[in-house]
Amino acid sequence: MRTRNLGRTGPTVSALGLGAMGMSGGVYGAADRTESIATVHAALDAGVTLIDTGDFYGMGHNEMLLAEALRGRDRDSYVLSVKFGALRAPDMSFGGVDTRPEAIRNFLAYSLNRLGTDHIDIYRPARLDPAVPIEDTVGAVKEMIDAGYVRHVGLSEVDAETVRRAHAVHPIADLQIEYSLISRAVEDDVLPTLREFGIGMTAYGVLSRGLISGHWNASRAPGPGDFRASSPRFSAENLEHNLALVDALRRMADAKDCSVAQLAIAWVAAQDDAIVPLVGARTRERLAEALPAVDLTLTADDLAEIEKAVPPGAARGDRYPSAMMRTLGVGN
């Protein structure tokens, strides 16, 4: 497994990370516990060291699942990235964000217990809290670093100005944000800012929730509890157009003797050496497909051809429903 550094101050991690959110249901429908744990084991055995979760994924379920999957593994053999601050209700709805220093200490205590560990490698607010200055949030995480409970500060879905303000308080290891062939708003201001300060990026949504994986089709309907049922890019008025973009990628993937998913992952990784794509594989089959993307080399001609087939802004529909779009630091 190849490795990459998450910026100048972040840890060295595998060139591909595993996002565990989908293993706890409530996003892409029901998940199989046995298969989820087997997938985590397969990822670790393949050399994947970066595992991303959130304390609100399944209201703690995801952290407890990972604790079980990671039991017996050398703690120094993997890097845990944990998001905090998102508030949930019993009906699974979101109730905003809380990143007050006292809340952070509380959230961290619960995460450490559920994960069965004495430290979190990268701890990050899930979203910007409009009621709490980012300086206060980062300062509280810094206190937890000084106390030995956290190793690095990360951010998630914030704009370039927030990155600058946060980095002035304590070095930021990485920004977790959506980045894919059809979600490229980060290229305007955010990515240049990360490069300026030597901050890494963990890119989620690299397959746009399966839309550009090569496995989605117009006749496939999201199942019960699947987020994609309310996603604008999967809606009837946008899906056919967006899948035509995938068809163009498929022709290029066939020429490279790779899958569409591998091509899309490799494109993200090719944009900067400090970018680590996260794949939300819920099965060993999908993980096995994603892993070869690490070794897929895209030439300048390949990248130019991909850009021509799927230029910025080519997709139709927002990446989230309108209510969720308002919580993001950047758009599509």
Image (spheres, rainbow, N blue to C red):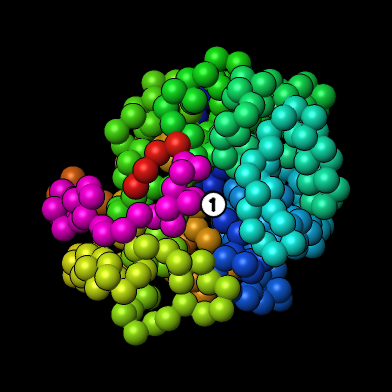
Rendered position, 77 above or below 23: above
* Residue at image point 54% right, 47% down: 14
> Residue 61 placed where, x, y %?
75, 61
> Residue 208 placed where, x, y %?
40, 60
| Residue interval drawn in magenta | 303-328
Would residue 84 be counted in the magenta stretch?
no
* Residue at image point 62% right, 67% down: 26
The residue tagged 1 is 17
| Left/right of residue 282 with respect to residue 112 in the rendered view | left
> Residue 300 placed where, x, y %?
18, 45
Would residue 318 be counted in the magenta stretch?
yes
| Left/right of residue 66 with respect to residue 185 in the rendered view | right
> Residue 294 placed where, x, y %?
42, 54
Which one is nearer the viewer's eye here, 60 or 32?
60
| Left/right of residue 149 with respect to residue 249 in the rendered view | right
Q: Residue 310: tell me if it is visible.
A: yes
